[in-house]
Amino acid sequence: MPEKTKFDLSGKVVLLTGGGGILGSRFTLALVAQGARVAVVDRDVDKAQAVVNAVNATHPDAARAYATDITNQEELKSLNHVLEAEFGLVDVLINNAAVKSPNFFEPFETFPLDDWNQVMAVNTTGVMLGCQVFGSAMAERGHGSIINTLSIYGLVAPDQRIYEGSQYEGRTINTPAVYSTSKAAVWGLTKYLAAYWGNKGVRVNAVTPGGVFSGQNDTFVQRYSAKAPLGRMAEPDEMCGAVLFLASEASSYMTGQNLVVDGGWTAW
């Protein structure tokens, strides 16, 4: 296959969870630009539909929105049947959904168990269920690609010093232990499934974004950027190349790997 066509996703069906978010919207546009048809899945169907409307304005009928609770196995099974009828069999599963619970920024010492369970249910169990439903079907057919979105804080601990005086949308922010734990667990699952389904033709990899600018205040941006070798935060579009690579035949001999797109943050 010529090198320039290995990134071509024409005829591929992609299921993207968390499709209504900042990264999800960029992933959708990048995928359809390479010829894929994308099922944009989000619990908030209005956000998903807004992404679809924007994408379809330039790529007609390339994306569709679906409201789905990824922590509900029966909803995922139902979605599988709907997609098969409307789009076709899923070739690429991108587990990108994540959640912030009501008390997400509570200190570890007083972090509520209900919040812990809510975050783990979406960030970790939701990924497992998606892999069960859609990955199992891939394994039966003998091909497919699964991409899990991780975080640098699933690999290394956050530097608490950068959060002093940091805000997002007017709220004081930090990175709670549950977030690091949930993402570290998905990295373990990624490696497990890569080995488990390797002989079935299903590749399972991960993308780990560093800090992506999305409106954090100047204090956070300056402190975060000072710790990154490239000296800045990422733009959302800068994660798309890794996703396209793992979704396409350009990465046909890659599985069980993690592409860390963090401006060098974890290289120190």
Image (cartoon, rainbow, N blue to C red):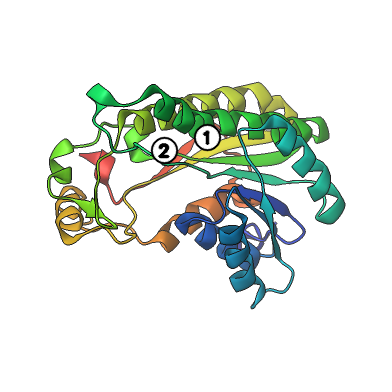
Q: Which residue type carries mark 2?
A: Ser
Give the residue at mark 1.
122
Spot the residue most to the bottom: 58
Q: Residue at x 47, y 56 (%)?
A: 23
Q: Residue at x 83, y 43 (%)?
A: 81
- Label 2 SS: loop
Quarter that holds the N terminus: bottom right
Cβ atoms under marks 2 and 1 closer than 8 Å: no
| 195 relative to 80, above or below | above
Mark 2 or mark 1: which is in front? 2
| 215 relative to 200, above or below | below
Which is more toward the observer, 69 or 80? 69
Give the residue at mark 2.
101
Which is more toward the observer, 52 or 95? 52
Q: How many neighbours does mark 1 have within 10 angstroms: few (below 14), some (14-19), or many (20 or more)?
A: many
Q: Earlier in the sequence, mark 2 or mark 1?
A: 2
Q: Residue at x 13, y 49 (%)?
A: 165
Which is more toward the observer, 99 or 244? 99
- Quarter of the view holding residue 195: top right
Q: Position of residue 111 (x, y in %)?
A: 30, 26
Q: Residue at x 19, y 53 (%)?
A: 220
| Left or right relative to 221: residue 16 | right
Q: Position of residue 109 (x, y in %)?
A: 23, 22
Q: Which mark is residue 266?
A: none
Residue 85 visible here: yes
